[in-house]
Image (cartoon, grey):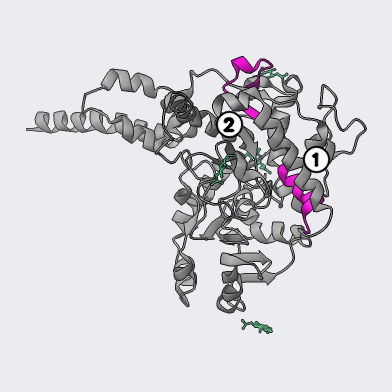
Amino acid sequence: MTGKLRWKGFLWLAIFIPISVLLFLLGTRDFSLSVSRHLDFFQDTFQGSRFISVQEFSHMNGPPLESLERCESPLRIYMYDLPRKFNLGMVKKVADQEKPWGKERVPSWPLRSGLKRQHSVEYWMMLSLLNPVAGNSSDSVAVRVHNPLEADLFFVPFFSSLSFNTHGVNMLDPETEKDRLLQVDVVEFLKKSPWYQRSGGRDHVLVVHHPNAFRFMRELLNTSIFIVADFGRFPHDVAWLGKDIVAPYYHMVEKYENDNVTDPFRARTTLLFFRGQTRRKDEGKIRLKFASLLQNQSMVVYEESSAKDGVQLSTEGMRLSRFCLSPAGDTPSSCRLFDAIVSHCVPVIVSDKIELPFEDELNYQEFCLFFSVEEALRPGYLLGILKTFPRRRWIKMWQKLKLVSHHFEYQYPVQKDDAVNMIWKQARRKLPTVRLAIHRSKRLKIPDWWHW
Ligand SMILES: *[C@@H]1O[C@H](CO)[C@@H](O)[C@H](O)[C@H]1NC(C)=O
Ligand SMILES: *[C@@H]1O[C@H](CO)[C@@H](O)[C@H](O)[C@H]1NC(C)=O
Ligand SMILES: *[C@@H]1O[C@H](CO)[C@@H](O)[C@H](O)[C@H]1NC(C)=O
Ligand SMILES: *[C@@H]1O[C@H](CO)[C@@H](O)[C@H](O)[C@H]1NC(C)=O
């Protein structure tokens, strides 16, 4: 009798100990990474067996696509030698605006450029290709090739957002003509390029991040891969999710590096934070309606301010808040979402048509809350949910924010999995579709009947 019991006890221990060790290891990040690295091994070993499902593993362990790509060689990019007036010559006025940027030191992004910096994606993308010796090229997903025949993709280094913000920002100003002429020149240049002609532009990448960037001519480049903030101001046959890449804004507030308090839930004394412009166009009109729902509520900060003042106040406010409201602005996306992420303040997204960067790798529901506009305007609904939000669930989201925020950093030299590398990875995933479209288009005898 006792012998049988002891035997049963051993059996239970023999099952229990390995399982708890496995569960513990799964909880640690390094092990998760190593598991995803060994996914192929699992796949080979257990294929067809019901012992373990690879899908389950890949679901638990970060980006599954990464593991599939790990053996791939770097993405080869040919960058056109456009005159510097199209790119870095706008960051720093230098002589010889007609010369392409060469091996000279690149001008650093001007510190006080405020709003312009939100859309500086084009600058960081160009730098990642321009002068890789200055950085650590082993960290870069993309490498520059000087022979177009070796290229996977072609990068057009035109700073279309900076051109708009520099010359065209008043829309009516005669200065805006300068922005338009640069656009005309880029289009002419591309249409003459044998490489553009070869692919019909499909393997060309252009950064069009500001909603008004390239506004006069972009429709003519409708086959190319655009890097955008969102699709708010694009016709659906010019830019769409399948063809293009959504990239984060460069955040305005400083990233929160030492967010190590022992009880962040308690340390953050504001429940919901919003500071910004409340008078916006289109879907952004909800911001005014929020004012009447959220102003003067306890533990809620809802303040009107212009974008120029108060980056410091927003930085402090977000770090002291559990949730940060991220409503639509003039377009579905806004910089505020990325400010919240780098402040580890759980974003509350109210923007029905928003598209999010890198959404094939990131599951935003792990670190953001989503409300439809209709839900958010129901009196008491949103605040009711936030007020009773379980502490443990919030802590999990906060921890996740700390793990993902490096994906939203633009920097030079690039670092592993930072914003620029994430964008290049997105571009790499477009390659099969791009090649398919190019090959098909060459042999078709009648106009294409699919919408690409
Ligand atoms: C690049 O990174 C590798 C590995 O992280 C390191 O060993 C090497 O020293 C770095 N090189 C430069 C130039 O920073
Ligand atoms: C797409 O570009 C082509 C060629 O540049 C142009 O003729 C066409 O009108 C554009 N389509 C749209 C929907 O703008
Ligand atoms: C906070 O944690 C980070 C790593 O997450 C570490 O680099 C930093 O030194 C820590 N700071 C403090 C003040 O403990
Ligand atoms: C909030 O309080 C301020 C000052 O007491 C007042 O001026 C404002 O109208 C109030 N807002 C709402 C939406 O009640």
* 156 in magenta: yes
Eyeballing the image, is 438 above or below 184?
above
Element under label 2? loop
- Image point (63%, 65%), residue name: 274
Place residue 87 in its image quadrant.
top right
Q: Which of pointers 1 and 2 lies earlier in the amino acid sequence?
A: 1
Q: Amino acid at mark 2?
A: Gly
Task: From the viewer's perspective, tell me whether residue 241 is left or right of residue 311.
Answer: left
Q: Where is residue 252 drawn, in percent x and y?
A: 71, 52
- Image point (79%, 52%), residue name: 176
Query: Residue beneath label 2, please?
Result: 201
Query: Which residues are the magenta region?
Result: 143-170
* 191 in magenta: no
Res. 192 visible in picture:
yes
Res. 156 visible in picture:
no
Q: Amino acid at mark 1?
A: Trp
Task: From the viewer's perspective, tell me whether residue 259 is left or right of residue 113.
Answer: left
Return the residue nearer the eye: 57 or 308: 308
Query: Residue beneath label 1, please?
Result: 109
Task: From the viewer's perspective, tell me whether residue 165 is left or right of residue 217.
Answer: right
Q: Is the C-beta of the residue carrying label 1 under 8 Å from the nearest atom of ligand 1?
A: no
- Image point (52%, 59%), residue name: 349
Regarding ligand 1, which quadrant of the image does it lie in? top right
